[in-house]
Every structure is written in structure tokens, then in C-alpha cells.
Amino acid sequence: MCGKDRVELKLQKKDPTVKKAALQLQNHRNKKALPNQQTVDYPSFKLLLVGDGGTGKTTFVKRHLTGEFEKKYEPTIGVEVHPLDFFTNRGMIRFYCWDTAGQEKLGGLRDGYYVHSQCAVIMFDVTSRETYKSVPQKHVDICRVCGDIPIVLCGNKVDVKNRQVKAKQVTFHRKKNLQYYEISAKSNYNFEKPFLYLARKLAGDQNLHFVELPALLPPEVHIDVAEQQKNEAELIAAATQPLPDGDDDAF
């Protein structure tokens, strides 16, 4: 988290008049954040998805949207906006996922795409150390433009054998009090967790849960469950150790 008041919206049954007023206020905010998107009559939020090119941002978000995994990688040009609906015990919620150009092709336009974001996911590739090393700067950029919004750090491609960023080496989230999840778009591993965490933060309700999940195609690969359990245990053990010195984590 960064430095301004975070956005909250209670997802709960209200008096119809109060509910209508709340939705009007939310739609007014969304018109600023999402000028080209049609608003809906249930809570919606702008989610910023950032990370180096090739980390799997586009394939991750399209897996939620269409149940398809992109087999061919094409660097994202500009920004694609994907509306993702989730069914919760408090009603429907929508994330407008802004998939930014990983190659930083936006240049000076980047801040314009960041503005009015209400939550964010920073993604890196566990098979590429360079993508993890770029996480701190992406966090700085988000905080500078967006202030204090809920942020999730995701390490993607945990299904791949030649992992370069070990679980115990992922410590940036601890330094900045972020939530971290290990995910795999190809195997669906932990696919819903970033969205559930952000929904709970935005709603201010830790009891919020999904009652229906988006349809996904069967996994293209099967994650090594035993190996990933070791990684998760490594994360838990690392959390009890002192943080490394310096801005960058050692490899």
C-alpha cells in the first residue's frame, strides 16, 4: 500500500434509495476512470495490470475472460481493457482490467493510463530474474500516480521447471506490505486469488467470497503439486526471517 486513503465500497444490501445514490456516485467515478467503457448497475473498479513483456499478463486476463490461453505471445500494444465479472456473496462485482504495454512503449502516456486506477496487480515471471528486478520501479510508478490502492504481487509460470526466482527470494511484498500469490495461467493454479483479495479490500469485507467462478478450459499443463507445496512452505518459512538489506533482493 502507498500513501492516500484507499477506495472502499461496501457490497451489501441497502435501502433502495441509498443503493441507487451509491451506484450513481460509483458510476460518476467510473466515467472518469473508464471514459470509453459502458457502466454497469453493480460495483465496478479499474484494475491496473502491469509487468514486463512476456510475464503472462495478457494470457492471464484472457484466461478469465474467455477461458482460452494464448499459445502465441504478441507484445501488447498500448492498453487493452478487459471487463471481468465475478459473483460474490454480496452481489456482482466487475474489474475493468487495463493490460498495459510491458515493453514500456507508452512512454509519457503511461501516467494517463494509470490515473484513477482503484487497484493493481504487478506481475513477474518466476523463470526470469530480470522481470522480478523491475517490480520495485513499477510499484513506485503506481504509488506516485495512484496513491494508496490495494496491490497484489503475482509470480507467474510456477508450473515451469527451470524456476530462476525461488520462493524464498521473493521478499518485495514484505517490504511494502503487499499481498503475494504464486500463480500459473497454464494450469489455473491460484487464478482467482488476486481478484478475491482485491475484492475484499475494495469492499472492506474479509468475509466476501466468490459464489461462482468464471468458466475456464481444462488446464493445459498439470502443476507439480508436491513441488509447489514445497514452494509455498518456503514462502511461509521465509516470512519469519529478517528482510534482506538494500533495495534489491539478492539472488
Image (cartoon, grey):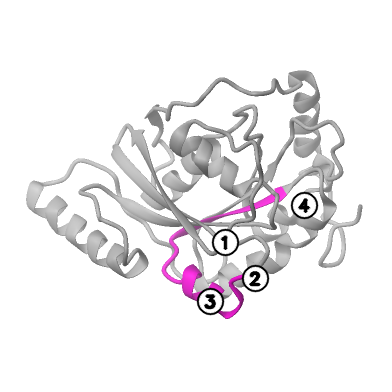
Q: Nearer the viewer, mark 2 or mark 4?
A: 2
Could you give the CA–CA distance between mark 3 and mark 1, rounded to whole angstroms? Answer: 12 Å
Using residue 203 as the reference point, say whether residue 237 is left or right of it: right
Q: Is residue 20 above or below residue 62?
A: below
Residue at mark 4 to residue at mark 1: CA–CA distance: 30 Å
Q: Residue at x 80, y 27 (%)?
A: 230
Q: Say if 207 sits above or below 147 in the image.
A: above
The residue indicated by pointer 3 is 109
- Measured Cα–Cα span from mark 2 to mark 1: 22 Å
In this view, the residue in front, 195 or 22, is 195
Identify the residue position indicated by label 1 in the image: 77
Q: Are marks 3 and 1 in contact (CB under 8 Å)?
A: no
What stretch of residues is rendered in magenta?
Answer: 105-124
Question: Tag 1, which secondary structure?
Answer: loop
Q: Residues within 10 Å of mark 4 (few under 14, many from 20)?
A: many
Binning the other alpha carbons within 10 Å of mark 3 as few (below 14), some (14 to 19) or many (20 upward) gives few
